[in-house]
Amino acid sequence: MNDWPEAWSDDNRGNRYGRGSASAEPESARVMRQVRRPASGAYGGGPNPSAPPYGGGVPPQPSYVDGQGHGGYDDSGYNDSGYNTGQVYGGGGPGGPGGTRMREPRPAPNWGRRIKRTAITVVTVMAVTTIGTYFWADSKLNREVDLSKVIERPEAGEGTNYLIVGSDSRAGMSAEEKKKLHTGSAEGKRTDSMMILHTGSNGPTLISLPRDSDVEIPTFKGSESGKTYQGTGRHVKLNAAYAEDGPELLVRTVEFNTGLHIDHYVEIGFAGFANIVDAVGGVEMDIPQDIKDTKSGADFEKGKQTLNGEEALAFVRTRYALAGSDLDRTKNQQKFLSALANQVATPSTVLNPFKLYPTMGAGLDSLIVDKDMSLFGLADMFWSMKGVSGGDGKSMNMPISGSSGGNLVWDKAMVKTLVEQLKNDETVTVSGN
C-alpha cells in the first residue's frame, strides 16, 4: 500500500530529495547541499531574461546537490568550481579564483631561542667594547722611561714595587692655567712627591719618601749620553737626583739607598693630576685642620668637603702651613691619593662610560710610565692604592732618625728591616714618622 498522496509515487519523487536507506545501518554523513544558480536566460528570452515572464508558469527550480553529483536537471557543461569539495567560502583552495586565503595560526614564540640570541648579542657587544677600550687605553700610555738603563740593580723580591712620582712639570700648561693652579713658571721639572707602593699577598703598603731625604748619588749611566758617571759619595736631597738626570737616575738612587728593587715607574704632572680629579667629579676629603697657604693656593677650613682639581692640587702641595713641614705634607698626599683611588674604583665611575672614559683619558694622557708597564699593572696599582686606607693596607713615611744640613736622615736599621719584609712579601711591622 502506498501512503503517498495521490498522483505521487516513489518514482515521480525523482532524485532531488534523496532516498531513505533500507539498510539497518544509519546513513553516512552527507556534505551540506549547495544551491546551483541557473544559467543566464533560464527564465526565458524576454527583454529581461533574468526575470520570469508573466503568466509563464512556474519557473524552473534550482537543483540541490547532495555532494554526490545528483541533481534535478542536467549538469552537462556546468563547472562547479569546487563547490562540492566542502569549501564553505568557495575557491579551489587558498589563493584560488574566487577564494579567500585562509591564514594559518601564528606559531608560539620560541623564548629559549630569543633569549639565546639576545645573550649572544650582549656578550659580543661587551667583548668588542672591552677589546676596543683596551687597545685605545694601551695606545695612550706614555712609555718613556727605560729601566734597562739602570745599572747594578738589587735582586727582585716577592710582590711588585711601584715608584710613584708627582712632578712639578708644567708642560702643556698655558699662562692662565699656571696662574690658576699656583704652579709658577719654572722651567724643567722636579719631583714634588715620591712614594713606593708595594703590592703582594699581605696587602698593599704605601711608603712616602720625603723629597728632603738625605741620599747618596751612586755610580750611574747617563740616560741620554749613555756615559757612566762614577759615584763620589756626595749626598744630596732625594729630589735632586731627578733634577740631575731624570727618572732613570731617581730609580737608581732609590734602589742604591734602600736595596729594594723597583719594578715599575709611574709619574704624573700638575695639570694631569688636576684633570683626573675634575674628571671624577671631585674627591671628598676630611681636612685635618684649617689650612691657608698663599704659595700653594690652599685655603681650607677643617672638616669634610669635596675638592675640585685646583683645590686638590693646592692641598697635596701645601707645605708651609703645616707644623711638620714635609713629613705632614706626605701624610696628606697619602690620604688624598687613597681617597682618589676610592673615588675612581667605584661602580658609579667604572660602570658609567660618561665618567669612565673622561677619567681614563685624563689619567692616561698625563701619566709617564716605564716601557714594561701594562694596563693590568697600572690597574693593579690603582686598586692597591684603594686598599691602602682600609682592610689590610698600610701607609707610612720612611723611618727618620734625624737631620743633617737641613736634610732628613733615614733610620738605617729600621729601613733595613722594612726592606727585608717587603722583599719577602711579609707583613710590615715597621712604623714610620
Image (tube, helix red, strand yellow):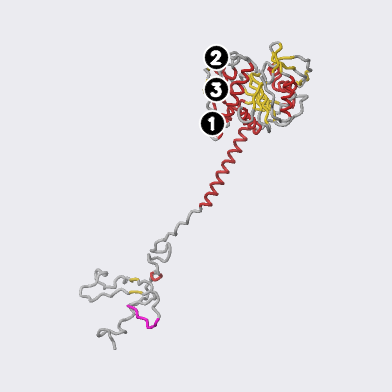
Image: 129 above or below 310: below
Q: Which residue is mark 3?
A: 286
Near mark 3 (Cα within 10 A), the count class, few <14, some 14-19 or many ≥20, is: some
Task: Give the numbered dot on residue 292.
Answer: 2
Near mark 1 (Cα within 10 A), the count class, few <14, some 14-19 or many ≥20, is: some
Q: CA distance from mark 1 to mark 2?
A: 31 Å
Residue at position x 31%, y 84% in the image:
10
Quarter containing the N terminus: bottom left
How many marks overall?
A: 3
Tag 2 or tag 1, which sits nearer the N-term? 2
Task: Give the numbered dot on residue 355.
Answer: 1
Q: Which residues are magenta?
A: 17-24
Give the x, y percent position of residue 122.
Answer: 55, 43
Q: Nearer the viewer, mark 3 or mark 1?
A: 3
Magenta segment main secondary structure: loop
Q: Quadrant of residue 101?
A: bottom left
Image: 20 above or below 431: below
